[in-house]
Amino acid sequence: MKSKEIHDHFTKLKQQRKDFYNSSYVNLDRAWSRPFPEKWSIGETLYHLVLMIRLFRRFSSVYIPILLPVAHVRKKRGYKIEMHNIYETYHQDHKKAMNAPFLIKPPAGLEEKWSINDVQSLLEHETDKLMANLDNIEQDLAGQIYYPDPVAEYPNLIQCIHLLAIHEQHHFKLTKKYLAS
């Protein structure tokens, strides 16, 4: 990968998943059981993460080529390489969790269509496809491709990958908290 920072964020993301799957709180045999009626199961949570990465990958496959000429012009400018946790900030400011947009909400009946191993494989597959799409983007260019996300304060591509890792860790923490209750 040409961008060390993007590579590092993907490495962190994959390590977080490994830690989550190996956590004593996570019983993948009960992956489709909801800890509370209104909270997602492990399987639903992982499928939400699949949908998130898939949406970002698909949007980026169109968006990045459009923004690359602008990034080339701006590539000597500075850029940020990390994100703050917008999910914690939102919760502190609004005293409630951020709602998932309908595009990334897991549909009903997932447990009838997918095994938890299938969902885990799908998550890895989507992540690998995203990594392959970003493999040849130089870091100075990635730092100048800004996404139209006002909630995240218009992050650049590097920050978006970090935000994917933050998003996953956010869900892993919540899931462990619910399972420990």
Image: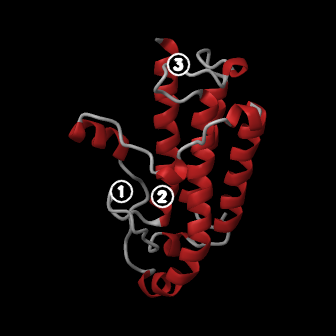
Q: CA distance from mark 2 to mark 3?
A: 30 Å
Q: Amino acid at mark 1?
A: Ala
Name the spot of residue 134 as percent of width and height, x first.
Answer: 64, 66
Of residue 1 and residue 148, the one placed in the foreground of this image is 148
Question: Is residue 107 rendered to the left or right of residue 84?
Answer: right
Question: Badge 3: how crowded within 10 Å, few (<14), some, or many (20+)?
Answer: some
Ranked by sequence position, the earlier of labels 1 and 3 is 3
Nearer to us of marks 1 and 3 is 3
Q: Answer whether residue 18 is visible to the viewer in this image.
A: yes
Query: Which residue corresponds to the image point at 73% horizontal and 19% vertical from the top-left?
Result: 29
Circle 2/circle 3 CB separation < 8 Å: no
Q: CA distance from mark 2 to mark 1?
A: 9 Å
Query: Which residue corresponds to the image point at 71% horizontal and 31% vertical from the top-left?
Result: 111
Query: Which residue corresponds to the image point at 76% horizontal and 38% vertical from the top-left?
Result: 113
Q: Which mark is residue 90?
A: none
Q: Which mark is residue 152?
A: 1
Nearer to us of marks 2 and 3 is 3
Ranked by sequence position, the earlier of labels 2 and 1 is 1
Circle 2/circle 1 CB separation < 8 Å: yes
Q: What secondary structure is marked by label 2? A: helix
Q: Amino acid at mark 2?
A: Cys
Q: CA distance from mark 1 to mark 3?
A: 29 Å
Name the spot of residue 69 as percent of width and height, x first.
Answer: 51, 87
Q: What secondary structure is marked by label 3? A: loop
Q: Residue furthest left?
A: 93
Q: Which mark is residue 160?
A: 2
Q: Which mark is residue 35?
A: 3
What is the number of callouts on the image? 3
Question: Is residue 67 rendered to the left or right of residue 29?
Answer: left
Name the spot of residue 47 as percent of width and height, x first.
Answer: 63, 41
Q: Amino acid at mark 3?
A: Pro
> What colour scheme governs how the chains and residues are painted in the rendered image of this protein?
secondary structure
